[in-house]
Each structure stands twice: as C-alpha cells, then as structure tokens.
Image (cartoon, rainbow, N blue to C red):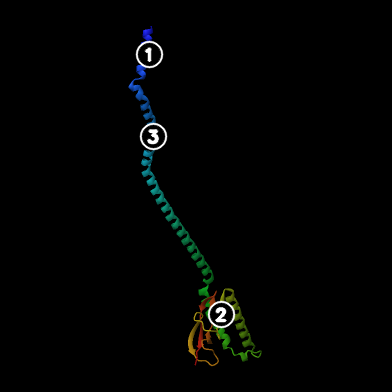
Amino acid sequence: MASWCVRAVRQSYSVLASPALKRAPVRLLCTATQQKNGPSSEEEAEKTEQNPAEKVLTEEKVQLEEQLKEMTEKYKRALADTENLRTRSQRMVEDAKLYGIQGFCKDLLEVADILEKAMESVPKEEVTSQNPHLKNLYDGLVMTEVQIQKVFTKHGLLKLNPEGQKFDPYEHEALFHAPIEGKEPGTVAVVTKVGYKLHGRTLRPALVGVAKAS
C-alpha cells in the first residue's frame, strides 16, 4: 500500500513538470491577447471598408446641396419674374383705365375746336340785347363750351393754352420762330391751336409761335 502511494505521488509530479503543461499558460496568454487585440483590428478593417462608402455618400451630399442651391436660385428668379409680370400687368390695366378713352377724347377735341372757333367768329360788340337772337346763340355756345370743359376735366382732360409760357417741346409744337416786340426769346408768343393733356400725358400738343431774339 505504501509503495502504491509513492508511485502515485511521483506520477503527479511528472505530470506537473511536463513541458506541455508549462507551455499551456503561454498559449492561454497569447489567446487572451489575440482576443483583446482582435476586435480592434476588425474595427480598423471595417473602417477601411467603410471609407469608400462614406466618400460616395459625401459626394452625393455635395451634389444634392448644389442641386438644392440651383433649384433655390431658379425658384427665386421665377418668383421675381412672376412679380415683374404681375406689376406690368397691373400697370397695363391701370393705363387702360386711364387712357382707354384716348381715341374718344381726340374725336371730341375736334368738336371743342369747332365750338371755340364759332365763339370767336361772333363780334362781341353785336352781342347785345338789341340782337336777342344772336345773343341767345352766343350764350348757348358759351354754356356748351363751359360744360364740355367740365366733362373734359372730370375725365382728366385739361386744356393747354401756353401763351407767355416757356416753350416746352413735350407740350408745344412750334410752327414758327420770329422776333416779337415785348416777348422774351424762347417764350410762346402766339397760340394758333390749344393743346390738351390726358392724366398728365400730352394728348395733343399746342400749336404755337415762339419768340426769338432779334
């Protein structure tokens, strides 16, 4: 029995002293080290694999931002064009309201001219109570001329009688230039036909004679 116990002890020492058992902790340490460092290497590999994908996404992002910027600029230009079109259309409508009667007014100006000539042709000294028919006719012409001028004024049509004023090529049409005594050069000396303006726009320039230096 004692000899068996001695053999068992010796076998245990031989197992513990075997080279395989001594190398086991080293292998375990290496395995632990690999397990510790392994995930870091894998993460780096994953990062390396992800870099091209991130690059593609970055390029797509830049392209999308450029497209967004371009579309925003186009949208702003479209808004500006629409606003300009709306403003022009509104101005055209307003002009049509103001100047839509322009042709009609020109036709009426001929009537006003004839009426004025008729009044000028009546000798003032004969317009007396002794000539009731002539007086009544003349008074009727005067009343008609006053009424027609009221209608013109109501619709923005104003008479231009620039005698004595400075010559304005935008409102007057010079028929002649002549030295006229008592008239300052460059002023309207004679008005042969009155002009008219419709809402501030010259509808018909006044026909005038302009004084010049002698």
Q: Residue furthest left?
A: 19
Near mark 1 (Cα within 10 A), the count class, few <14, some 14-19 or many ≥20, is: few
1 or 2: mark nearer the eye: 1
In the rendered structure, which amino acid carries the disc numbered 3? Asn
| Picture layout, residue 185 above or below residue 68 | below
Q: CA distance from mark 3 to mark 1?
A: 41 Å
3 or 1: mark nearer the eye: 1
Query: Looking at the image, which is closer to me, 151 or 83?
Result: 83
| Picture layout, residue 71 above or below residue 44 | below
Q: How many marks?
A: 3
Task: Tell me the tag on residue 37.
Answer: 3
Near mark 3 (Cα within 10 A), the count class, few <14, some 14-19 or many ≥20, is: few
Determine whether the residue tagged by mark 2 lies in a helix, strand or loop.
strand
Tag 1 near tag 2, CB within 8 Å: no
Residue 197: % across, % down: 54, 77
Mark earlier in primary sequence (3, 1): 1
Residue 202: % across, % down: 51, 77
Residue labelled with disc 1: 9
Q: CA distance from mark 3 to mark 2?
A: 103 Å
Q: Quadrant of residue 12?
A: top left
Residue labelled with disc 2: 159
- The quadrant of the image that shows the N terminus is top left
Residue 55: % across, % down: 38, 46
Tag 3 near tag 2, CB within 8 Å: no
| Residue drawn 37% across the image and 12% down it | 8
